[in-house]
Image (tube, rainbow, N blue to C red):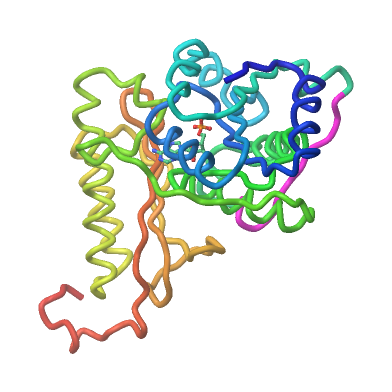
Amino acid sequence: MLIIRTKAELRAMTQDWRRAGESIGVVPTMGALHAGHLSLVDRACAENDRVIVTLFVNPKQFNNPEDLAKYPRTEDSDAEKLTPYGADILYVPDGAQMYPEGFATTVSVTGVSEGLCGGARPGHFDGVATVVTKLFLQTDADRAYFGEKDYQQLQVVTRLAEDLDLKTEIVGCPTIREEDGLAMSSRNLRLAKGPREIAPVIAQVLDDAARVISRGGQVAQALDNARAALLSAGFDTIDYLELRSDPDLKLMTRADRPGRLFLAAWLDGVRLIDNVPVAGLASVPTRKDHPLEPA
Ligand code: AMP
């Protein structure tokens, strides 16, 4: 695997591949790679002749300078982890490659970017949309791989690729979890031992709420119970816990179509996010259909 740091060198490689008629997959990351990222790389390698993994901690998508400063930077071990997978290039541009002096363009997606992380982190999805548009163009990718772990991001990127007529097809991949259910994240490294043991409560609480809702339980009640369970487990604050439609991410108060539960919560000064699917009920049942469920 080659490590490339400039757009010009990257372009020379992709032009050679194109002349040979080869397809290109890209996996955008901010590094501190774990099995979640590697599952995307594995899939990209299976579906494309050539694969580029990008590593760039994008300052434009951090609304909190402290969060940006604390973000783990582990390029050497990232390169080592990628070695067995068969990616061709690890592309590691610096800030000047991505945002040279005078850079003045923002890609901004409305609709799916509003609320959830878009509400809690102003400017976050403009930063994401701008950097991924640049990465798609720089890598000349046919396919780009994104995790469902960041489900709103996946929908924002899917929307922008369609709206801007980009040739890059967006491929969503399932969330990879630790054995105890915690969704893998580079941020998990920042949890001390005690909070790390509390963190899997997120997955348990989301699964429980999704089960209750998909059996016809009241959405508001299920969400209240989930919030109470998180706070009593030791979470400090909950940025949001909401049921949204899939894939357009409209707020739902009844499970009358397929949706997802979305959560962002703070534990030990670390912001954790997760989401799970909720099967839609063909018609929301009345209490008569489920006499044992609370009203
Ligand atoms: P990041 O480095 O956090 O920007 O993530 C890079 C890509 O990896 C994004 O598409 C994420 O959605 C994806 N990703 C991160 N964690 C996971 C996970 N646990 N399972 C699947 N994909 C993930």
Looking at the image, which residue sits at the far right? 102
Q: Residue 204 placed where, x, y %?
A: 21, 47
- Please provide the residue range marked out in magenta: 103-113
Residue 237, magenta (yes or no): no
Residue 149 position by quadrant? top left
Q: Residue at x 48, y 43 (%)?
A: 43
Q: Is residue 225 above or below residue 287?
A: above
The one nearer the camera, 236 or 148, is 148
Residue 3 position by quadrant? top right
Q: Residue at x 61, y 51 (%)?
A: 170
Q: Residue 278 placed where, x, y %?
A: 35, 64
Looking at the image, which residue sits at the far bottom? 288
Q: Residue at x 35, y 34 (%)?
A: 184
The one nearer the camera, 199 or 160, is 160
Q: Residue at x 23, y 38 (%)?
A: 200
Looking at the image, which residue sits at the far front? 20
Residue 104, magenta (yes or no): yes
Q: Residue 39 placed where, x, y %?
A: 42, 38
Q: Residue 5 placed where, x, y %?
A: 70, 16
Q: Is residue 272 left or right of residue 69?
A: left
Residue 22 position by quadrant? top right
Q: Is residue 30 left or right of residue 286?
A: right
Q: Main secondary structure of the magenta part?
A: loop
The one nearer the camera, 23 or 178, is 23
Image quadrant for the N terminus? top right
